[in-house]
Amino acid sequence: MCGIVGIVGFTPVNQSIYDALTVLQHRGQDAAGIVTIDANNCFRLRKANGLVKDVFEMRHMQRLQGNMGIGHVRYPTAGGSTASEAQPFYVNSPYGITLAHNGNLTNAHELKKKIFEVARRHINTTSDSEVLLNILASELDNFRHYPLKPDDVFTSVRNTHKLIRGAYACVAMIIGHGMLAFRDPNGIRPLVIGKRTLDDGRIEHMVASESVALDTLGFDFMRDVEPGEAVYVTEQGQMFTQQCADNPKNHPCLFEYVYFARPDSFMNKISVYSARVRMGKTLGEKIAREWDDLDIDVVIPIPETSCDIALEIARILDKPYRQGFVKNRYVGRTFIMPGQQARRQSVRRKLNANRAEFRDKCVLLVDDSIVRGTTSEQIVEMAREAGAKKVYLASAAPEVRFPNVYGIDMPSANELIAHGREVDEIAKIIGADALIFQDLGDLIDAVRDDNQDIQQFECSVFDGIYVTKDIDQNYLDYLDSLRNDDVKADIDHHNAENLELYNEG
């Protein structure tokens, strides 16, 4: 999961892209990057590991000149996590193209070989985003006239769709032309577009992973980029759009609404906040219906995603809602931290129990989801240490039983605590006196309530159904090998050595 942004304007965009990335920081904390095109038609690039506020210093911002640019915050799912893997990537031919990508290509390995053998293009990292960029560049290179016409750009995207598989929301810039954004034919990863009218009547355009980035910069939300659609905005600010997929379907990722997206975002015409409130309603009703024997004194969220969910559960159950955990806001989101050891060590640094809310009480803890179970186990333990008599745990999402292949770093099946286990066994492992999961049908209904046109969500982590229909056990084994922490460490070491040699040269 990553966050992307792109702006075509008539004033410098460096500060605006920086501000947008800070708003999208929750989507990736591993690395950040911005690239602009200056007045001399040259790329100005800064990218490095770290949070947005740490990657960009004043000297970097001053060099990021230009009225058009794209940005990225990275959350690694496969491969390495060194600075060489940070986005955006760029190629010099044709024209000069740079690209940032959110998602995961499920056929990246075979495409990398094809790119080298057919197009003679070398991929320097393990990132599928670099593969995607080179596929797009190769398609654009088929047009020998200059400048490119909008139809040429759309034809290139159409041919790219035919070659690549998986989930992808992309934003790119072509020197001498403009900004291009496109979304996969299943609409798995989110992408929205907005505009801002200047005092002199000129219109600036912006694309981003979430609508909240538009809000922050004063851009008016126009709409979601449709599945399979491409949006092309020229340097002069003219916008063109075209559907570039043969059979697009809208299958947005269900887990976006459970965990990743900010509550103040709208995606696929759905309010994330409203969806989470409805998750609390359906889960609260299930607890009242099926778990009425639980002696609950207080409802406590595990901050922050579950706060709105827990508040609605408390209302349904007519129980007090209390903030029993105090969050250290300077520790990142544990689910998207690279490496199991980092995730484990950060839990107690991130949360501290308010003993007054736990002492001698039977507490219902509410979380958005349970993936590995590491965090849940430690939090239940913290609640008991704080004096709780009974600790019940409710999850706003169903059991996560299957790996994700579309850009979320959900590990191999044997690392998922719910894989192959019944609820009672999971409860025993994490130490809870009772464990309640949301039903998948209820979760889908809670999210879809704002947009009944969505017929199917991408919810493979819950049901094992992969909407691209190209996933088998061989691919899952291959992906598992890329996500292994030891493998990532080896890749990072190799990339670091290459980067050092490059810098020395």
Image (cartoon, grey):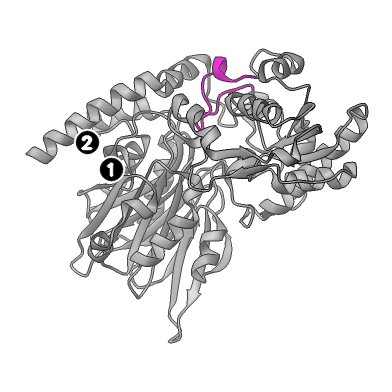
Comparing labels 1 and 2, the label whose residue is closer to the camera: 2
Viewer-closest of 499 and 449? 499
Determine if residue 317 is in view: yes
In the depicted structure, whether residue 127 falls above or below residue 172: above
Residue under numbered circle 2: 121
In the depicted structure, whether residue 393 falls above or below residue 331: above
Viewer-closest of 34 and 193? 34
Q: Residue at x 73, y 19 (%)?
A: 427
Could you say whether the residue bearing mark 2 is in a helix, strand or loop?
Answer: loop
Label located before the other in sequence (1 or 2): 2
Relative to 243, is 256 on the left or the right? right
Viewer-closest of 13 and 180? 13
Could you say whether the residue bearing mark 1 is in a helix, strand or loop?
Answer: helix
Q: Residue at x 37, y 60 (%)?
A: 179
In the depicted structure, whether residue 226 falls above or below residue 235: above
Q: Position of residue 268 (x, y in %)?
A: 63, 52
Q: Position of residue 407 (x, y in %)?
A: 49, 35
Relative to 111, is 301 on the left or the right? right
Determine if residue 147 is in view: no
Question: In the rendered image, which quarter is residue 188 located in?
Answer: top right
Q: Are marks 1 and 2 in contact (CB under 8 Å)?
A: yes
Real-space Cα separation, disc 1 to disc 2, in angstroms: 9 Å
**Range of residues picked out in magenta:** 401-417
Residue under numbered circle 1: 138
Residue type marked 1: Ser
Which image quarter holds the C terminus? top left
Number of the label disc, if any, that sits on residue 369: none
Confirm whether the magenta stretch covers residue 412: yes
The crowd level at tag 2 (other Cα within 10 Å; few <14, some 14-19, many 20+) is some
Q: Position of residue 484 (x, y in %)?
A: 42, 20
